Amino acid sequence: MLKGLSPLLSPELLATLYRMGHGEEILFADAHYPVHQAGVPVIRADGHNIPELLQAVLPLLELDAYDPAPAMMMDVVPGDSPDPKVEAAYRSAIDQYQSNVPPIAKIERFAFYERAKSTHAIVATGDTAKYANLILKKGVTPT
């Protein structure tokens, strides 16, 4: 254990966040997401939900201030209805650690799957909420 770091940050997740360059993306995937189909490294975070992981990650990860959508979620398929508490929890975590972040963008389901293929890594969580997948784009750490 390291002092001042959340115990939710596994050595693998911490190393991945450190290795990411600005403009690279990381996907926090819900338990339903086909994480191994994207062909990118998968970090297991089973038993943890995405909002609690965001509380551990966002103090360390600056979101891209130059991108109009540094946070993205999978859009709801017509006929489904999302749980508004999911996005609200993400927004709350983002706002707690960073200011002036634009609204969370929505990406059509299959476009989201395609985008996931170019992420730096996928964090496979135990979150069972529908449409809980979240991509974050890393920015430049302020001086």
Image (cartoon, rainbow, N blue to C red):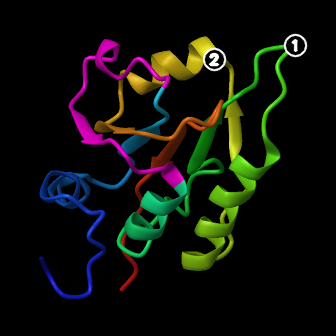
Secondary structure at badge 2 equals helix
Q: Report how many numbered discs are placed on residues in the image.
A: 2
The crowd level at tag 1 (other Cα within 10 Å; few <14, some 14-19, many 20+) is: few
Look at label 1 and name its amino acid: Gly
Residue 2's x, y, as percent? 14, 81
| Nearer to us in this view, 80 or 46 | 46
Q: Quadrant of the N terminus?
A: bottom left
Q: Is residue 108 left or right of residue 52?
A: right
Residue 125 place in picture, x, y as percent: 40, 40
Q: Quadrant of residue 14?
A: bottom left
Q: Earlier in the sequence, mark 1 or mark 2?
A: 1
Q: For the residues marked 1 and 2, what is the alpha-carbon distance in whole angstroms? A: 13 Å
| Mark 2 closeness class: few <14, some 14–19, many ≥20 residues within 10 Å | some
Q: Which mark is residue 5?
A: none
Residue at position x 43%, y 39% from top? 126
Observer-nearest residue: 79 or 24?
A: 79
Residue 140 visible within the image: yes
Q: Which residue is mark 2?
A: 109
Type of amino acid under label 2:
Arg
User: Residue at (41%, 17%) from the top-left corner?
Assistant: 34
Q: Nearer the viewer, residue 123 or 137?
A: 123
**Left or right of 126: which side holds 12?**
left
Task: Examine the rendering and report whether any part of residue 103 can be seen.
Answer: no
Residue 83 located left or right of residue 127 = right
- When the figure is inspected, residue 9 is found, relative to residue 74, above or below; the finding is below
Q: Position of residue 78 (x, y in %)?
A: 84, 13
Q: Which residues are magenta?
A: 32-50
For mark 1, what is the residue?
79
